[in-house]
Amino acid sequence: MTSIFPWIILLAPLLSTAVITLFTLRWKALSSSISIAAVLVSFICSCLIFAHSTAAAAGLTWIGISGVFQVPFGLTLDPLSRTMAVLVSGIGAIIHIYSLGYMRDDEGKSRYFAALSLFMFAMLGIVLGNNFVMLFIFWELVGFTSYVLIGHWFYRDAAADAAKKAFITTRIGDFGFMLGILMVWMGTDSVVFTEIAQRLWILTSHPAFLTIAALLIFCGAVGKSAQFPLHVWLPDAMEGPTPISALIHAATMVAAGVYMLVRVAFIIQASPTALLVIAWVGTITAVMAALIATQQNDIKRILAYSTLSQLGYMVMAVGLASNEAAIFHLFTHAFFKALLFLAAGSVIVMLHHEQNIWKMGGLSRNLPITFFTFLIGALALIGCPPFSGFFSKDAILALAYERNTPIFVVGLFTAFLTAFYVMRLLVIVFFGKSRSEIARKSDESPFVMTGPLIVLALLATIGGFTFFARNFLALPIEKEVAFLVPALAIAVLILGSGLAIATYRNRTSEPLSRAFALFLIGGLSMREQWAEQAVAHGESARYYGWPKWGIYRLTCFCLAWESSFSSTSPSSADVGVEF
Amino acid sequence: MVLFIIFCPIVAAILIMAGAPARKTALVASGLMFLTTLFLLVSFQRGQRDFQHVTSFTISPEWHLSFTTGLDGLSLAMVLLAAIVTLAAVWFAGRIDKYENAFYACLLFISGGAIGAFASIDLFFFYAFHELALIPTFLLIGIWGRDNRVAAAWKITIYLAIGSFILLIGLILLYQSVPVTSRSFDIRALTVAAGSGQISADAQRHIYLLLIIGFGILISLFPFHTWAPEAYASAPAPATMLHAGVLKKFGLYGLLRLAIPLLPEGARQWTGLLVVLLLGNIIYVGLVTIAQKRLDWMLGYSSVMHMGYIFLGIASASILGATGAVVLMFAHGLSIALLFAIAGELRKRTDTLILDELGGLGKVMPFAGLAFGLGAFAAIGLPGFANFAGEILIFFGAFQNGWEMERFHIFQIATVLGLWGVVISAVYMLRAYRKTFMGTLPERFRGWKELVDLRPALRVPVTLLVGALLCYGFFPQSFVRIVVPAFRTYLTANKQP
């Protein structure tokens, strides 16, 4: 009997998508109920399986040519995937319910819920898939749902551009990922994780080959988890509805890259070079995103850069060869970042879609529940004891302290920056005087929105305690943390918060000079020096500058050649190449 | 049964010419054809290598020429494609302003010719049926086309006539290369003869080159591809659906049916050339596609680009690659037909397909937006659609060809570049979708009465096309099981232990 549950987890959301798309597009309330029912079914089944440590599922053949190529459609049910399934469907369920409130007047509500269900299907597929091809299939499908949901308000130019950019950028990463899969398959003659693990010696006897394959697989995570240099899509992805930012672009999909790295860690950890590269990519992403976050003015973009930075921590942990620390931080981050986004969504919706933090102010009085839950999320994010983020970030920092001192120093600096930008956000949005009419008249959100906030706040608080981590997340946590590491972490936390409070208390506009912002952000080769511009354009243009120019030239050449064969082809004078 | 599928559209076309109500007759005929094909699909003996449902009428015993038809997995897949696309194309055609009867008759002739070519086991009829299908294509462009239709019609006529002519020379040489005693037009007999080494290696090399060029022109292989986008942009939508979706697959089918099994030595000799040309299709044409300013041109070029992947599968000469090529031929035919159909419907409403003048149509035409979006994502190989299954098989098949742990050879490099093509295709498709359906509606479309969604009846063909794509995308094994036995005889697993 238990063997059917894993399939129900996977197929209930798919069924919901099919039913909504085919039949109930016209009835919005019905569509949303179907979608919520499906995610609840998935959640319940995930919990049932979580309790059964002996759960197993029969596999099917997706493509099989005897003697040449076998791709089974099978499910993995080890502790990692079972725990992850509970997390994904649990947070998914909370956000489905929150969406009822957030999207209540949206004319595309049915489409939204259909895509949300499809996302649950794809994400749970990533979690449960037992081979590389399955993983890649669901990997692309979450990319597709992300495209649909970022572009939910497709009639807005910014949303349409952001959706396109997200899909194409992640596909560049998937190019490397697929190549890595091909190499591993050629080396071991299998795409199934367990079989690859058995034949790993073939790869380890070719170290250079193994390193290249591991780094190519990492490319997939670079795209999906928005690591440097493919991070450019994530801030723009905030054009989507806020529950989507919380679910897909903070808690689950962007963490899928980290999950994938942990799933194939046995390959990556066989190559020290690959590990080092991965650790540094994570570190660079963490510190760079944190630096940029200190000068953003859009509440969602600040959180987006913060997500980048935290994902950088997770990838850093993977690079330091500790799956436990990476997954631990993935979990606590999922709780507190989903919470922060949903609280931000509550602010945004109550302020009639105003996202500029300088137009808010003093909201702690009008939105007490939102404020209180946001505060918990913020404290967890900056790693304030006893909230969950303290424990998980500490685990990573302790690891870095042990294994790689330069990375530890950068990681500590990132923690300082995190405290700074989070406190800046908190002070500007919730304290001081209200700086606009709508901020003065704002009111608390309905219960469908605050309820999920309270649940998540609870999880963000207790998620880091050892008993919780060990018993519910099934993670062995290393205990002997040096005294120095938490002490330093708390010191930078106090320093960063204090500095931010001192700088931003009772301000009505950015007090730091333009030169400082230029130094911080312009120096990081970002095009937008000021956040207002960023909302309109995104940071891609300069970033893609030279490859874009190269492709532009190449395309002009091709087109000129092409038009010499053609009677009515457009002239090559003005080619429109854009990404 | 097979004869019925071939002659059903041809007889219907003749009836229509004689004055039967055009649209109704065409719909009934293509519906019957579709149902019969479904029946054949269900009753097909899986795992069997030989042709099934064979019927034969001897025409000339001393030449070993006979009208023989039958289906194996490969031809069944193609006939299924033809039947689905024909039904969809006829359904989408709607009312035609001038010479309605002749228009529908032309469509059905294309369909009958294509199916005849796919189902013929005889070399002569294989070629003759294809020619039968080509002529109405020229007529459809010349008479019912738009823009620069005369130039486009001339161009496609000249290109395809030259291609067919080179192909004819190749086929005649092929027929003569077999010793007199075993000379035959029957493809099965030729395969047996080639299998026992009766075609000399030298002859194989010459003939293979002729076939690659001849078929290549028909398939729009780089650098013989320039006819395709122009013709597709000028032709009426149903004609484009049938040509890009079905008839163009004839050349690929020919390569799989003749060139690979009969001329393995030639295939080895010219692999390098073919790989370079197909990379031209994927990379060069891909870049040209990105720069297109019109939706129909973009679709035409994208169709040319995807031929590159199918060539890659064929060039890899492994079961994996060849099977992937067939899956992709099938899937590409359905998705490109869907895209051209929607583009045609758009054009009827907006009068323009210049991307910069469009925008925001998803809001006023949600169903068209959904259908085009599904077609676009199918075309760029999103998992869940059959295109992805085909592409992944091709990449795996090509990547393993000549594999060594230490270094990359030509096929590995080709696979890397081909994979990069997947990124290119995402760029041009999403760019076009963004410019057509997303964003704000341009000022001049405000209050246009013509700008309405597709009529509800068109949901049927869209569902048919998307349904087939999804069905074989989720369960590619049911398709692979039909196709693989056809290759088992002459393609090896091609993998080092």
Image (cartoon, helix red, strand yellow):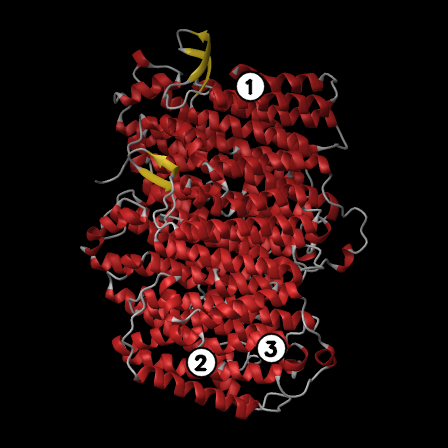
- In the picture, the quarter occupied by the N terminus of chain A is top left
Q: Which residue position is annotated with label 1?
A: B6
In the image, what residue occupies the spot 53% across and 39% down? B470
Residue at 36% across / 44% down in the picture? A56
Question: Of tags 1 and 3, which is closer to the observer?
Answer: 3
For marks 3 and 2, the one nearer the N-term is 3
Mark 3–mark 2 distance (CA, rounded to whole Å): 17 Å
Calculate the distance from the C-alpha at mark 1 to the C-alpha at mark 3: 72 Å
How far from the left and from the top, in percent, is residue B337? 59, 38
Against B391, is A520 above or below? below
Say which element carries label 2: loop
Q: Are marks 3 and 2 on the same chain?
A: yes
Q: Residues within 10 Å of mark 2 (few under 14, many from 20)?
A: many
Residue B62: x %, y % from top left = 39, 7
Q: To which chain does the residue with label 3 belong?
A: A
Label 2 belongs to which residue?
A384
